[in-house]
Image (cartoon, helix red, strand yellow):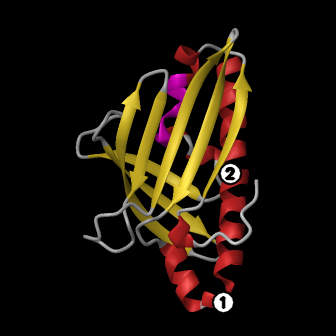
Amino acid sequence: MEWTGARYADQPEVEVEAFVAAPPERVWPLLDPARMPPTSTELQSVEWIDGATGPAEGSRFRGRNAHPSLGEWSVTGTVVTCEPSSTLVWEMDSADVGEGMPSSRWTLRCVPEGDGTRVHQQVRLGPGRSGLSRAIESMPDKEQKIVFVRLREFEGAMTRTLEAIRADAEA
């Protein structure tokens, strides 16, 4: 994928995919964000809040993160699409409370393929502010490099997540 020249305001995105030798119905439960911290070097924990116990449209969760360059932070996510065995989409709140725009949008899709499932994971940055926004503001001349590096980090993390989902579903 080519990210050269991407700026945060462009809402850059990255997507990875993996084939899983299991039907979507077996893969789907593994897409719960609360299952993802063990596969991540950044996402430390996920806790469903406001009485939610798992993904459903409108359900919310709090994620706790740590990154060597960005520090530690918590952020709230809201599930905006939940179509069982098909599509799960959530948006993370902006770093500026009350801004009303998500700092990122995460999508997981299960597409039946033969006897298995093609799983796609995508993240789109912005349009709301995030910790990345602060990094860009402190080094505006390096914005494109900052965005490029962040998307590469997400690409690696999402690849590890899909590999873990594949291993669990195929076990």
The single residue placed furthest to the top in the displayed view is 115
Q: Nearer the viewer, residue 164 or 128?
A: 128
Neighbourhood count class around disc 2 (C-alpha, 10 Å): few under 14, some 14–19, many 20 upward:
some
In the rendering, which numbered label is found on residue 126? none
Q: Nearer the viewer, residue 28 or 6?
A: 6
Q: Quadrant of residue 6?
A: bottom right
Residue 29 sits inside the magenta stretch: yes
Q: Position of residue 162 (x, y in %)?
A: 67, 37
Q: Residue at x 39, y 47 (%)?
A: 47
Q: Residue at x 57, y 82 (%)?
A: 135
In the rendering, which numbered label is found on residue 157? 2
Q: Position of residue 128 (x, y in %)?
A: 40, 68
The mark that comes first in sequence, 2 or 1, is 1
Name the element at disc 1: helix
Q: Is residue 92 above or below residue 30?
A: below
Q: Is residue 53 above or below residue 72?
A: above
In the rendering, which numbered label is found on residue 141? 1
Look at the image and tell me whether residue 171 can be seen. Answer: no
Look at the image and tell me whether residue 80 can be seen. Answer: yes
